[in-house]
Amino acid sequence: MNRSLGYHRRFVFWQAYSSVVMSQSAQTQLLDRFGRRVDYIRLSVTDRCDFRCVYCMAEDMEFLPRPQILSLEELARVAHAFVRLGVTRIRLTGGEPLVRNNVLSLVRDIASAPGLRELNITSNGSQLSKYAAALRDAGVTRLNISIDSLQAERFKAITRVGNLERVLAGIQAAKNAGFNRIKLNAVILKGRNDDEILDLLEYSIANELDISYIEEMPLGHIDEHNRALTFCSSDEVREIISERYELLPSVASSAGPSDYYQLAHSPIRVGFISPHSHNFCHLCNRVRLTVEGRLLLCLGNEHSMDLRAILRNGASDEELEQAIIAAMDLKPERHYFNLDDEPQIVRFMNMTGG
């Protein structure tokens, strides 16, 4: 099979490679060519969002027509296949996953998969006042909530349309629903919100929330800001925090890319996600499924397999699983991000799944 796939290229339908994948021995775990075990998948349930964050998408987005996106039944079928192959953690992403109609039925379906240990959701928080308790009851284990500013006008500028008070109410609703280890995600942009690094941390401490600071990822063409000029490294963020708080190394892990630290006098964890400054590819244990059914083997590359074609051409569960096993050979060793060049990846983050 061709291992160099561009954005507009797809694998041929499963008939073309069934003789290859069906010859592979059955296995209960997914291993790539570099010996990394994949036990975590992020499923994008929609490319739509009620925000338009400046680092995530263009202001005037064109979203996929309904026939091109996976149905809830197709998403659930892929999720169950991955669990049968040894995946123990699933995260539902978007876009904003909670704007997908009937998303709770998908949550309940996936949560019922035998062997699944964690079912998590990444949300912008705007819908959590409505859905937090129901998500907890449906089987969601943990929540990640994105929040890049605690100043209402600045928050609206970064999200283009977001309402800060609504998100803060959503965070409180998640706490009231009984979620443990809620984590905030903050993308830090120099000159935009880097002066709020400590404010965000102090909010997290006061509300007993974990927090991860994220370096902006160069996905998609944007003209709202210059990524090279707004780039703020994790080292810079850590240095600012260290001026006021002692950061202690931690062995904690959320199975994601965060490098965690503990505060000396607080139970919260402080994480740093550093795709530019501290490449974490050697530890990568995850893959992504886009809402259009592309199994993306790396966030920063286009290596992928078209599972939508396989699903819609009548593949059995065994054939679907064997295709997933075969796709592990496509997972590259690492990604390469360069802030000084045009982005190599033209898909936006809302298309990729956060």
Image (cartoon, rainbow, N blue to C red):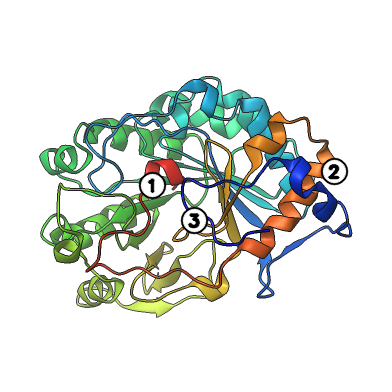
Q: What's the CA distance linking mark 1 and mark 3?
A: 9 Å
Residue 126 falls in which quadrant of the image? top left
Q: What's the CA distance linking mark 2 and mark 1?
A: 31 Å
How many residues crowd mark 1 within 10 Å: few (<14), some (14–19), many (20+)? some
Q: Which residue position holds label 1?
A: 347
Above or below residue 338? Residue 9 is: above
Q: Residue at x 31, y 63 (%)?
A: 215
Amino acid carrying label 3: it is: Glu
Amino acid carrying label 2: it is: Glu
Residue 240 falls in which quadrant of the image? bottom left
Q: Which residue position holds label 2?
A: 318
Q: Residue at x 52, y 28 (%)?
A: 68
- As drawn, the label of residue 302 is 3
Q: Residue at x 68, y 64 (%)?
A: 329
Q: Under tag 1, what secondary structure?
A: loop
Q: Under tag 3, what secondary structure?
A: loop
Q: Residue at x 62, y 26 (%)?
A: 72
Q: Residue 283, percent across and down? A: 56, 72
